[in-house]
Amino acid sequence: MSKTFYIPTLVIAIFICLITSSYKPKDTVSTLTKEHLGEKLFFDKILSSDYSISCASCHKPEFAFADTMAFSKGVNGKFTARNTPSVMNMAMRDEFFWDGRAKSLEAQVVGPVENPNEMNLPFKEAVKRIQSNQEYYLLFKQLYQKAPDSASIVDCIAAFERSLETDQTPNDRWLNDLPNGLTTQQMRGRELFTSNRTRCFDCHFTPDFTSDEYRNIGLFDGKVFNDSGRYHVTKNLLDIGKFKIPGLRNVAITAPYMHNGIFKTLREVIDYYDEPNKFMKQTLYRDTILPLHIGLTEQEKQDLESYLHALTDDRFTKTSSKK
């Protein structure tokens, strides 16, 4: 055989080695994994129509993969219809988006890419882009033993999102009788949080502080607040104004809050639940599970907020303490 057959093969082999060694996410591993390839795509602007934003543009890592704006900015200066939720602690969820329209993390991946107010790129076009990118082509061939396709693309991004679990918080340590758990004030806040008086725990329980249900918390009046939420998916009149109950891990750093980002701080959220009618004079279909008036004292509000801060993972408190 002539040498011209071996040289291109050798060049390609070296090129693959260089690519896979050049991308070393957080924990620096030598073996390419779905999580690392998914992370690379999550931060790549190749998935937006004008190459201006990535998934991480709205799901900011330093804010627990949420955004700091009520509505995130997409391509062409457009804004999202709803607040960008965190994509952390999604491994145990079975429905996604505020209205639950996606039944898997893989299905969830496609939504923002194709949404005209977000990344505005038909997913078929996204696949073609990745297939024509020599670096991605080789990485997918190495990992999946085939060229990139829609299934493998959503598979690796979903794998990355499933890896974003957190369990190093003061509350976790307190539950496991470890040092540096809850403070005295946070324990008082936890008592309130789990009490029949506030009923927070009725909706925010399980390890991730969500029941994974849909509730109308009183932010629907059919006029100013007219997003009917879950109803868009089910067409069931009983679902008007209902939205997915978010998990509360890292909630202290994911402001603003609610599906419409209406509350800028945790204190505003607490004030609302304490006396919702003070904020919403007229509301439709509000869930009866929610108290109409709790009557928290100033100290109790501070205690409750302090407890919610105890749900923040150490990686974020350490980051903020360096600033």
Image: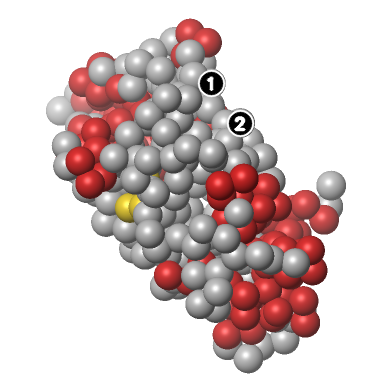
- Residue at 75%, 59% (x, y): give it: 318
Q: Is residue 210 visible?
A: no
Instruction: Give 320 or 72, whichever is nearer the viewer.
Output: 72
- Rate crowding at label 2 as few (under 14), some (14 to 19) or many (20 or more) other CA atoms within 10 Å: some
- Residue at 60%, 41% (x, y): give it: 279
Q: Position of residue 145 (x, y in %)?
A: 20, 43
Residue type (three-letter) at the residue carrying disc 2? Met
- Residue at 60%, 54% (x, y): give it: 275
Distance from disc 1 to disc 2, alpha carbons, whole Å, reads 9 Å
Residue type (three-letter) at the residue carrying disc 1? Lys
Q: Position of residue 225 (x, y in %)?
A: 45, 30
Element under disc 1: loop
Number of the label disc, if any, that sits on residue 73: 1
Instruction: State the scheme by which the image is colored.
Output: secondary structure
The image shows residue 58, relative to residue 307, as above or below, that is above
Instruction: Give 188 or 212, whichever is nearer the viewer.
Output: 188
Q: Is residue 198 left or right of residue 156?
A: right
Quadrant including the N terminus: top left
Element under disc 2: loop
- Rate crowding at label 1 as few (under 14), some (14 to 19) or many (20 or more) other CA atoms within 10 Å: some
The image shows residue 6, relative to residue 236, as above or below, that is above
Q: How many marks?
A: 2
Number of the label disc, if any, that sits on residue 69: 2
Instruction: Give 72 or 297, whichever is nearer the viewer.
Output: 297
Cβ atoms at labels 1 and 2 below 8 Å apart: yes
Q: Position of residue 29 (x, y in %)?
A: 50, 56
